[in-house]
Amino acid sequence: MASPSYSANKSHRNTIFVVDAEILRHEVYPGHQHILRVQAEDCARQARPGQFAHLTVDRQRPMRRPISIMRASPDQGWVDFLYKVAGEGTRLLSQRKAGETISVMGPIGKPFTVKEKKPLLIGGGVGMPPMICLAEALRRQVDVQPLVILGSEIPFPFDSKPSQLMLQGMPDGVIGGMPLLEDWGIASRLASLQGYPGCYEGYVTDLAKHWLEALSADQRAQVGVYACGPEPMLRAVVNLAREYQLPVQVSLEEFMACAVGGCAGCVVAVKAEQGVAMQRVCVDGPVFDGLRVY
């Protein structure tokens, strides 16, 4: 095997903005989850599904935190982030209030690229935002029929409702969906081991397998898989894609310092023709070909 090499990708240059963004609203949900909306016109205009922003959390704490973009309005200039309090940085961020200003650096990273007619989007926990962002982009493509499967072991940051969009292969009683996706006309289903009403009791990959098994060979040939979530979930998603010989893209999460490729503190090993390439999650990703990562 060849010695690991470092990527020299510089495609991110002149595409990242740093702005002092006003907090428009900051909502709290069960499980220490928060949705933050900021006014950041440049970031909103350039944001693509799968990208993230680097946010300040407090004036006394200079280290930023990378948070995935969940929604962005190019017309109105706002950007939404869903995050969970997991440490001191996000705890400080959770205390920021509407009307205050935080520094937003973004959008950062390589986005998802969808080519298939039946994309399967799988999000777990705080990996849900990139899937919601991608679903919103796909709703404008009339010839694309996405399915979004979301999983969580804490209460979902929205009230699920019975879906009116029927799907092949869904087990009896699995009717819970995300209202926002339902309003967009995008089919969604929820999975959890916590016994939430309307949810599939099991893993997101098991629910995805029910759907894939119900498709014809021609239909499966139109499927591509897109995922973000905890590493064990991503490994399971990639194994599922291998089993059904499907293309798969995954958005990775990693600790970051600079988030613009300078420190190389977020590198991961990616399989390449010459061996292994050490690529930076911040700018070479966060979206990678799943078959090259796992």
Image: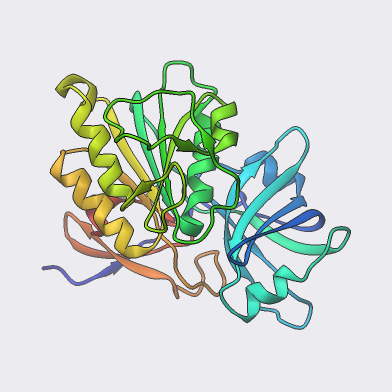
Q: How is the image coloured?
A: rainbow
Q: x, y percentage for residue 283?
A: 47, 58
* Image vertical order of residue 228 relative to residue 208, above or below: below
Q: x, y percentage for residue 202?
A: 31, 52
Residue 248 appears in the picture as rendered = yes
Number of marks present in the image shown:
0
* Image vertical order of residue 27 relative to residue 218, above or below: below
* Image vertical order of residue 103 relative to residue 265, above or below: above
* Image vertical order of residue 128 relative to residue 139, above or below: below
What residue is at 53 percent from the left and 23 percent from the top?
185
Q: x, y percentage for residue 141?
A: 49, 21
Of the pair 171 and 263, the residue shown nearer to us: 171
Given the current orientation, which residue lies at the most extreme right position?
99
Given the current orientation, which residue lies at the most extreme left position?
1
Q: Is residue 233 left or right of residue 239?
A: right
What residue is at 51 percent from the left and 70 percent from the top?
262
What residue is at 48 percent from the left and 16 percent from the top?
142
Q: In which quadrant will I find the C terminus?
A: bottom left
What residue is at 60 percent from the left and 45 percent from the top?
159
Q: Is residue 78 left or right of residue 208?
A: right
Q: In which quadrant will I find the N terminus?
A: bottom left
Q: x, y percentage for residue 87?
A: 58, 79
Of the pair 163 and 7, the residue shown nearer to us: 163
Q: Residue 165 is drawn in which quadrant?
A: top left
Q: In this view, does 244 lie to the left or right of 226?
A: left
Q: Residue 118 is drawn in which quadrant?
A: top left
Of the pair 174 and 62, the residue shown nearer to us: 174
Residue 50 appears in the picture as rendered = no
